[in-house]
Amino acid sequence: MFNLNKALELPSQLEWKFSHEPELMAWTIRARNYNTFVANGMFAFMLVVIMGWAYFFYSTSASGEPSFSRLLVSICFYIVCASVISTMTHQRMNFAFRFTKSGVEYCKWKDFPEWALTFLKWLAGITAIVFIFMATIDPSFLLGALIGPGGVGLTYLSMAYSKNYREMHTYYHHYAFKWEEFTQLAIATNREVVDLKYTITMDGDDFETNWSLNVFCKRKTKEKVAELIRSYLSPGVPFIKAKVNVPLSTD
């Protein structure tokens, strides 16, 4: 239903700069290109906060409302909020890497998470059916049907038809580097990353910019990727193994 494991394909908005050259190595991967420790901590904290709010809604609902109805509303609230938070703290970026004799280039992009809309649509439909069925037993469940599934439906509509929300979760970038621009190669010991430090002069600048390129790869291919990169670097470029701190953004 969600197609979470479908193969990655380079979107039409992006293209390779060195497409005329044979590739030495190329692959695509989904990766979390940010500090995962901080993101996981934020997610855990927000889950506790959301749980507190869910309990608050459950305990402060009208006394005449059935406990099962209040429980369903609280659960719906918790699931929706947790799902929205997870799309922010656990989102994965799509990457495509390509090595040629001229250098390293990669594309990164993020498509709008249609699976989240599908999830909310199904959740709203299923919970609405449950509440309507329960309302045949006790009419007070109709209130829960308005609050629970109704809230999920409003969340779905705001995400599906908000242009700003879609633009915030959709973008495309392409980068290209020459081999001589890299000043250090490091194999990360804490993540599946090969880190490359580089020095370049940006267009319009009269000074050099120093930054890092995180090459995300599979655990089994990390050493192979590093060795290939090493063979094309300038003589004397340091090659180390170290803990790598993935930045929040490289833009």
Image (tube, helix red, strand yellow):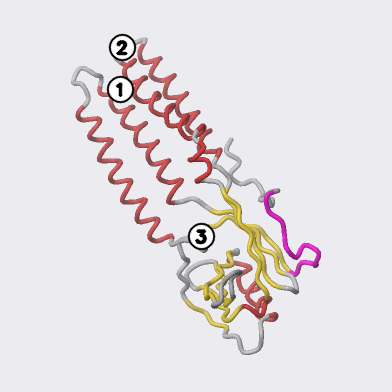
Mark 3 Cα within 10 Å, few/some/many (few <14, many 20+)? many
Tell me whether circle 1 and circle 2 mark residues in contact (CB < 8 Å): yes
Question: Judging from the image, what secondary structure is the residue with disc 2 in?
Answer: loop
The residue mark sitting in front, 3 or 1, is: 3
Q: Amino acid at mark 1?
A: Ser
In the rendered image, the vertical position of residue 137 relative to residue 158, given as above or below: above
Q: Quadrant of residue 100?
A: bottom right
Query: Which of the pair 87/248 is nearer the observer?
Result: 248
Between the residue at mark 3 and the residue at mark 1, the CA separation in whole angstroms equals 41 Å
**Which residue was labeled with disc 1?**
69
Query: Which of the pair 13/197 is nearer the observer?
Result: 13
Mark 1 Cα within 10 Å, few/some/many (few <14, many 20+)? many
Tell me which secondary structure the magenta stretch mostly adopts.
Answer: loop
Between the residue at mark 1 and the residue at mark 2, the CA separation in whole angstroms equals 10 Å
Mark with earlier residue (3, 1): 3
On screen, residue 6 versus residue 19, left or right, reads left
**Which residue was labeled with disc 3?**
33
> Residue at point 42% right, 24% down?
127
Q: Amino acid at mark 3?
A: Asn
The reply to whether the magenta stretch includes residue 17 is yes
On screen, residue 205 versus residue 16, left or right, reads left
Q: Quadrant of residue 230?
A: bottom right
In magenta, the rendered stretch is 13-24
**Which residue was labeled with disc 2?**
138
